Amino acid sequence: MHRLVLVRHGESEWNERNLFTGWTDVDLSEKGWEEARAAGRLMKEEGLGLDMCYTSYLKRAIHTANAALGEMDLEWIPVKRSWRLNERHYGALQGLNKAETAGKYGEEQVLLWRRSYDVRPPPLEEGDGRCPSNEPRYRGNPPEGRPLTESLEDTVARAVPYYESEVCADIRAGRNVVVFAHGNSLRALVKYLDGMTGEEIARVNIPTGAPLVYELDDGLRAVSKRYLGDRDAIATRERAVAEQGKGRRS
């Protein structure tokens, strides 16, 4: 039996402000730092012997990994980073308040942008300063690695092949792997591991800072999965993610 752990970064500064974040490189909030440390303590208490760590290129995932591994005395394990584990790119929505956007365009439209499988948000203009092509970390990427917007389907198309080629190689070599990434890049992996349809994954919300432990058979098929930590607290975090795109109520 093999083990894979998926951890969404702790609450970010823009999560706290209910802003669309995507590839914008914001840091953890004070609460997010504590969620990251708590995730590490949970994994340590569980006795997870981790051998390899993966993160995206975004510091909210990197800092969550650093804080969690620090709690586990595992700062020394190898770390691999890839833009293919980045959050879904939210295009021109990045930086906008989700509730205010719902008030302007309607909750149904915002839900479509946030949770549909194949609908992309409005793209950035080519000259927009927020374009990934303006950042050194992405300049050598192929075109799909410098997106102007993405759907979840696009995120699956980059995250799953990376998982199959890189992460699975480490798992097959007998290593216990942890992936610190984002709500949508992890939803892409959950969709793949659980054999979900686009409609089914639309109803899945990944809470911040909650380690999700998969047990895999020798064919790397998921046998079981469970979140570490208090189930009621995790359910509250899941509901909070689901509520982010709703307009403000008077």
Image: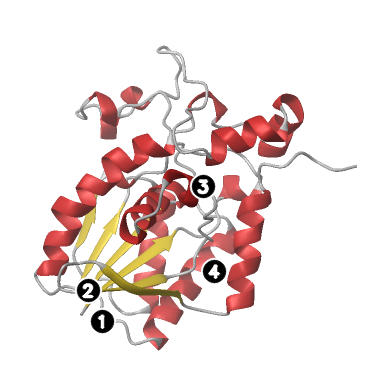
Task: Give the mark nearest the N terminus, 4 or 3.
Answer: 4
Residue position for label 2: 176
Position of residue 72 relative to residue 52, above or below, is below
Q: Amino acid at mark 4?
A: Glu
User: At numbered mark 3, what does the secondary structure look like: helix, strand or loop?
Assistant: loop
Q: Which residue extends farthest right?
A: 250
User: At numbered mark 4, what does the secondary structure look like: helix, strand or loop?
Assistant: helix
Left or right: 14 as drawn, with respect to 185: right
Q: Amino acid at mark 2?
A: Asn
Asked if marks 4 and 3 touch (Cβ < 8 Å), the reply is: no
The residue carrying pointer 4 sits among few (fewer than 14), some (14 to 19) or many (20 or more) residues within 10 Å by Cα, namely some
User: At numbered mark 2, what does the secondary structure look like: helix, strand or loop?
Assistant: loop
Position of residue 36 relative to residue 95, above or below, is below
Please tell me the numbered disc located at residue 49.
1
In what quadrant of the picture does the N terminus appear? bottom left
Asked if marks 1 and 2 touch (Cβ < 8 Å), the reply is: yes
Residue position for label 4: 34
Left or right: 91 as drawn, with respect to 83: right
Of tags 1 and 3, the one toward the viewer is: 3
Residue 22 coordinates in the image, percent (x, y): 47, 38
